[in-house]
Amino acid sequence: MAVAVEHDKRRQKILEKALVVFMDDGFEAATFQKIADRCGITRTILYLYFKNKREIFTFSIKQLLSTGEENIKVICADTSLSSIEKITSVLLSIFKLLEQNRQLLSVVLDYLLHISKSDVNPEERVRRRTVRLRHILSSVVIEGVKKGELKKSKIKTIHDYLYSFIESAIFQLTVLKRKNLDELKETIAYAAKQLAA
């Protein structure tokens, strides 16, 4: 049992240090050797934990998303909040996570551009990584419609409307190099109220 715990701890440390390499060098320039060097281990030992840099990168992204999802689940479970308050809080929580990880977002965009040069569909990759987030947003919307707190309309339309704010936030932080999402946060409060029944 202790061996498994140590293995998991070392794997976690590798992921943390690998993220720094990805953020410093970008996805394409990051190498397995650079990651091993940053971790203070050999490439051979690194191969015991991960088969390639893409796998390390994917695990790093999963870890970040799972942290965000846990925060969002807490908001969604709060019965004292209305559906509008939940939607607003969920989006603001996501914005905070994006602001805190703006450099990593740039690496993700670098990665998506990298894979788009091959036969891989980047949209499919993004959808797979965000499916739980999309489900959570849809669940809040469905709950709000059922309670009569949100206007009756197609769930997918409302979901796409809300998700477009997340995409806008990513664009503003990475491409436009905005320091924060303050203007978009104000827009969210207004936009969520427009969904009220």
Image: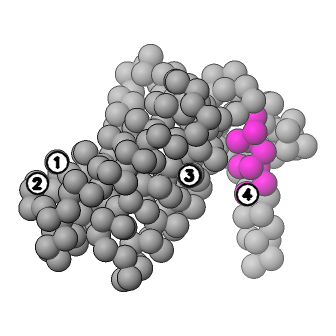
Residue 154's disc is 2
Label 3: element kind: helix
Question: For the residue marked with disc 4, what is the amino acid?
Answer: Gln
Q: Is the magenta stretch mostly helix, strand or loop?
A: helix
Residue 194 location (% of width, % of height): 22, 54
Q: Tags 3 and 1 in contact by the CB under 8 Å rule?
A: no
Residue 30 against residue 161 in the figure, above or below? above
Residue 177 appears in the rendering: yes
Q: Distance between the residues labelled 3 and 2?
A: 28 Å
Residue 125 appears in the rendering: no
Q: Earlier in the sequence, mark 4 or mark 3?
A: 4
Q: Which of marks 3 and 1 is nearer the N terminus?
A: 3
Q: How far apart are marks 4 and 2 (CA)?
A: 41 Å
Question: For the residue marked with disc 1, what is the amino acid?
Answer: Thr
Residue situated in front as seen by the camera: 70 or 187: 187
Residue position marked by numbered label 3 in the rendering: 96
- Which quarter of the figure has residue 144? bottom left
Q: Which of marks 4 and 2 is nearer the N terminus?
A: 4
Query: Magenta segment: does it hold 75?
Result: no
Residue 12's disc is 4
Residue position marked by numbered label 1 in the rendering: 157
Q: How far apart are marks 3 and 1 (CA)?
A: 24 Å
